[in-house]
Amino acid sequence: MNDRFYQDYKAGTLDINAYLRFALEPLTRHSLEELETLHREFMAEHIEPMMLPKALALLEEHRSRGDQLLIITATNGFVTRPIAARLGVDQILATDPEIRDGRYTGNFLGIPTFQQGKVTRLQEWLADNHHHLDDAWFYSDSINDLPLLEAVARPVAVDPDERLTAIAGERSWPIISLRD
């Protein structure tokens, strides 16, 4: 099922609500304490080995310029908030799983941070935090982020999928790799 959802994501046809129901359901099977332990193991075994020096350097470059760092991700907050913390990024917009009575319910809160939902959530965050998109950068690898790439002054395609590569080329957006 996960492979099917991933293919839909790559094609830009993902049903985000169906995917979130699928992805959040396993959280309902464990206590918050068990999940915290599992996430620490996940970070050590899977995320730390994937940390890209070029990505860390890019974040540091923006920090040194005094830029406000914000991660906007379609991946749920249970998975991504600890990754953002590890990267030293305090601000993150993610689809947050609902917790009720000390347990995950399998539902999510608010508008999913996916496709146009990223733009909507960002606009709300900007208004609440008195920031603007003048001279803003956004980095993405996915065609699913086209609405947000089009909303910022400095869109950058990073190790992009085929469709985003084509659009970035047509629009003369920078295309970079953090992997080589």
Image (tube, helix red, strand yellow):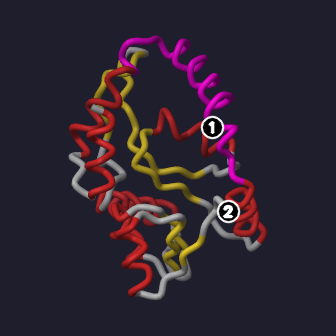
Amino acid at pointer 1? Ile
- Identify the image quadrant of residue 143: bottom left
Secondary element at tag 2: loop
Q: Position of residue 171 (x, y in %)?
A: 41, 87
**Would you name the residue on which mark 2 appears?**
180
Q: How crowded is the residue under tag 2: few (<14 C-alpha within 10 Å), some, or many (20+)?
A: few
Principal secondary structure, stretch drawn in magenta: helix
Q: Which residues are magenta?
A: 27-52
Q: Which residue is pictured at 75% across the width and 62% down the height?
A: 57
Distance between mark 2 and mark 1 Cα atoms: 18 Å
Amino acid at pointer 2? Asp
Inspect the magenta stretch and tell me whether residue 36 lies in it: yes
Q: Which is closer to the viewer, label 2 or label 1?
A: 2
Q: Position of residue 162 (x, y in %)?
A: 39, 67
Q: Is residue 34 above or below residue 138?
A: above
Disc 2 + disc 1, Cβ < 8 Å:
no
The quarter in which the N terminus is drawn is top left
Q: Which residue is pictured at 31% across the width and 59% down the height?
A: 115
Q: Which residue is pictured at 57% across the width and 52% down the height?
A: 91
Q: Which residue is pictured at 42% across the width and 63% down the height?
A: 161
The quarter in which the C terminus is drawn is bottom right
Q: Position of residue 19 (x, y in %)?
A: 27, 38
Secondary element at tag 1: helix
Q: Is residue 1 above or below residue 154?
A: above
Most foreground residue, 122 or 87? 87
Total number of numbered labels? 2
Q: Is residue 16 above or below residue 108?
A: below
**Would you name the residue on which mark 1 appears?**
47
Most foreground residue, 133 or 130? 133
Specify whether 60 is left or right of 159.
right
